[in-house]
Image (tube, rainbow, N blue to C red):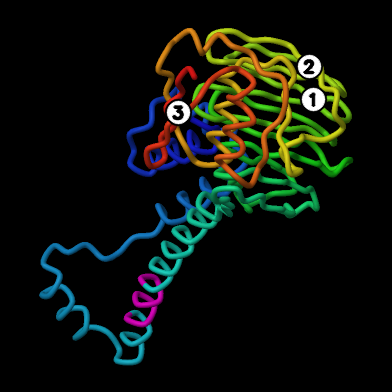
């Protein structure tokens, strides 16, 4: 769960008066706690007339009061109630704006989407991928979450930039890098500058032409020979990469799943490329050099020996 989601849950528990002392200490460290605390303290100081014998008491007070004065008291009570309602509406709007003012981009099969973030940073989103970020306080909290694959060109001298994904995070100041997070596979490649990444709770520092990848069980450092990710062109290229990793990239690009008829096929490695706009041709380019064939049923690809 992200820090933002944790804070949202803590605020809700705070308003419901179910927050523990330890959770309250955590909440007090958040940037919005002072504002919320002031609002809550102000509303707690307000009070309405007690309901006990309210009608009889009200009648007696009316008889004793000067008519003009009574109007002023009734008007003042009305103003307090109206102000309470308006403040509660304001709190609700503020919370919705703070926590739920998000922007989301998604791409379709074989689609590559270009995105410009509020600070001018650029993102290229690969097929069947999603990018999401909160607009609130963006300049002080540049953070996005992705599923799938995306290439980032981050504006420099504007503070930290954070990318979160299923199995980890990337933190940078200003650089160019690529993140792949699909099913159990994760890969982070640095093309320019320097980044810090955490995958499966292990931290790494990557500079230009360095990469890191994980299949969920093992983590491997890699060398990047291209200046930009090949998937942004007409082809996606690989050099001595496990077949399962190649098919996982194909799965993301075309929105398909795959199964191996023989488990020995999983051990094969692939060097070459596949096209990004024709699934059947892409499968031929991958499987034919490895003496493999395929059968296709709907969106499932069955890998077989020739």
The label nearer to you, 3 versus 1, is 3
First of labels 3, 2 by sequence position:
2
Magenta stretch: includes residue 253: no
Q: CA distance from mark 3 to mark 1?
A: 33 Å
Q: CA distance from mark 2 to mark 1?
A: 6 Å
Q: CA distance from mark 3 to mark 2?
A: 33 Å
Span of residues in magenta: 74-81
Spot occupied by residue 194 in the image (x, y as percentages of width and height): 85, 25
Spot occupied by residue 216 in the image (x, y as percentages of width and height): 53, 14
User: Disc 2 designates what residue?
Assistant: 205
Res. 229 image quadrant = top right
Spot occupied by residue 242 in the image (x, y as percentages of width and height): 62, 15
The residue sitting at 69% across, 13% down in the picture is 203
* Number of residue marks: 3
- From this view, report whether residue 91 is shown above or below residue 133: below
Q: Which residue occupies the foreground of this view, 57 or 8?
A: 8
First of labels 3, 1 by sequence position:
1
User: Disc 1 designates what residue?
Assistant: 195
Secondary structure under the numbered disc 1 in the rendered image:
strand
């Amino acid at each position: 769960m992200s820090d933002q989601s944790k804070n949202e849950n803590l605020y809700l528990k705070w308003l419901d008066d179910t927050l523990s002392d330890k959770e309250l200490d955590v909440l007090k460290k958040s940037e919005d706690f002072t504002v919320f605390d002031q609002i809550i303290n102000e509303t707690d100081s307000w009070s309405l007339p007690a309901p006990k014998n309210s009608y009889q008491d009200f009648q007696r007070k009316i008889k004793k009061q000067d008519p003009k004065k009574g109007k002023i008291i009734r008007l003042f009570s009305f103003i307090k109630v109206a102000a309470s309602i308006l403040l509660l509406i304001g709190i609700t709007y503020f919370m919705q704006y703070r926590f739920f003012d998000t922007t989301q981009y998604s791409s379709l099969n074989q689609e590559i989407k270009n995105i410009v973030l509020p600070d001018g940073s650029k993102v290229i989103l690969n097929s069947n991928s999603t990018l999401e970020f909160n607009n609130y306080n963006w300049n002080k909290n540049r953070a996005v979450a992705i599923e799938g694959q995306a290439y980032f060109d981050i504006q420099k001298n504007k503070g930290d930039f954070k990318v979160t994904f299923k199995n980890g995070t990337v933190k940078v100041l200003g650089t160019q890098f690529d993140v792949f997070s699909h099913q159990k596979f994760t890969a982070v490649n640095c093309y320019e500058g320097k980044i810090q990444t955490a995958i499966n709770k292990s931290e790494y520092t990557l500079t230009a032409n360095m990469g890191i990848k994980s299949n969920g069980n093992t983590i491997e450092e890699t060398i990047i020979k291209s200046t930009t990710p090949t998937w942004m062109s007409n082809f996606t290229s690989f050099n001595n990469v496990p077949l399962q990793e190649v098919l996982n990239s194909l799965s993301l690009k075309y929105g398909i799943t795959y199964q191996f008829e023989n488990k020995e096929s999983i051990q094969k490695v692939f060097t070459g490329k596949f096209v990004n706009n024709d699934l059947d041709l892409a499968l031929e380019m991958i499987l034919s050099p490895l003496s493999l064939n395929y059968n296709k049923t709907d969106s499932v690809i069955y890998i077989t020996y020739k």
